[in-house]
Every structure is written in C-alpha cells, then in structure tokens.
Amino acid sequence: MVKNKIFFTLVILIFSFGVAYAHPPSDITISFDPSARTLTAVIAHYVSNPKTHYIRKVDIAINGKEIIEHLISRQDNNAGQTVVYLIPDVNENDSLSVEAYCSISGKLQKEIKVSGLPKS
C-alpha cells in the first residue's frame, strides 16, 4: 500500500514538472503585405527541443471566421515559428487574426486591421 502511494506521488510529480515547463507562445508579430496579399506571423515560443515542444497549430481568421487551419509537426527553431499565407479574399478594414497553439499547453491570439490595399 505504501509503495502504491509513493509510486502515484512520483507519477504526479513527474507530470507536474512536465506541465510546469509547458507554456503558450509568448508573442505573435503579424504583418500584412497589401500588394502581395500575404500575411506573415512570427510566433515567439522559446523551447529547449523544437521536435517535442513546438507550435502544433496555427489558425487564421478574417473577421472572426476561420479560413486556414495549419497543422505543424515541429517548430522552425528554438525561438519560434514563422508562417506565411496568401490571403486573396481580404478587404480593406478587415480584421485578420492569428491563433497559435503550443503542442503541450496553451495558446495565444493576436489581430491586425487590413489597410493599404491597392485599388482595383
């Protein structure tokens, strides 16, 4: 009985330490090139091993409606993930949002307004 309690206590401690090191992305820098209609998001997520702790998914939305769900299998590097998307259907003053999900725990969302689109 005592051995079982010690075992379960150790399992809980190990799990707790793993979760303690998990964290959501710390920042997302979004830019939009109106002439090319491309959105670039630089997602800051500092990790020790980008193969096991990484940005696993990025969602892109226009005015709150999801248009892209991008699943990712590993992070670019230890500092974060950069993604670039062509967004042909965006209009002047639309809101573009980027939501990034950590593979272990947490997420972060940032938003920008579109401006400067060329007149057609």
Image (cartoon, grey):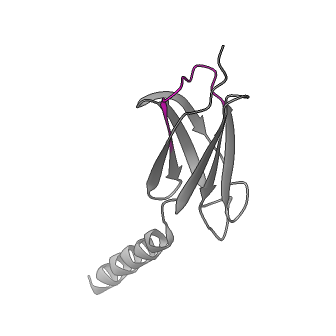
Which residue is found at the position 52% from the left and 48% from the top? 100
Which residue is found at the position 29% from the left and 81% from the top? 5
| Image side of residue 42 versus residue 77, left or right | left
Splitting the image into 4 quarters, where does residue 33 fall?
Answer: top right
Residue 74 seen by the camera: no
Whole-percent x, y for residue 70 in the image = 59, 36
Considering only vertical position in the picture, is 34 above or below 81? above
Viewer-nearest residue: 88 or 18: 88
Whole-percent x, y for residue 48 in the image = 65, 71
Q: Name the quadrant of the C terminus.
A: top right
Whole-percent x, y for residue 47 in the image = 62, 68
The number of discs equals 0
Magenta-drawn stretch contains 87: yes
Q: Main secondary structure of the magenta part?
A: loop
Q: Name the quadrant of the N terminus.
A: bottom left
Which residue is found at the position 43% from the left and 29% from the top? 63
For the record, the magenta segment spans 86-98
Viewer-nearest residue: 2 or 81: 81
Residue 119 seen by the camera: yes
Whole-percent x, y for residue 42 in the image = 64, 52
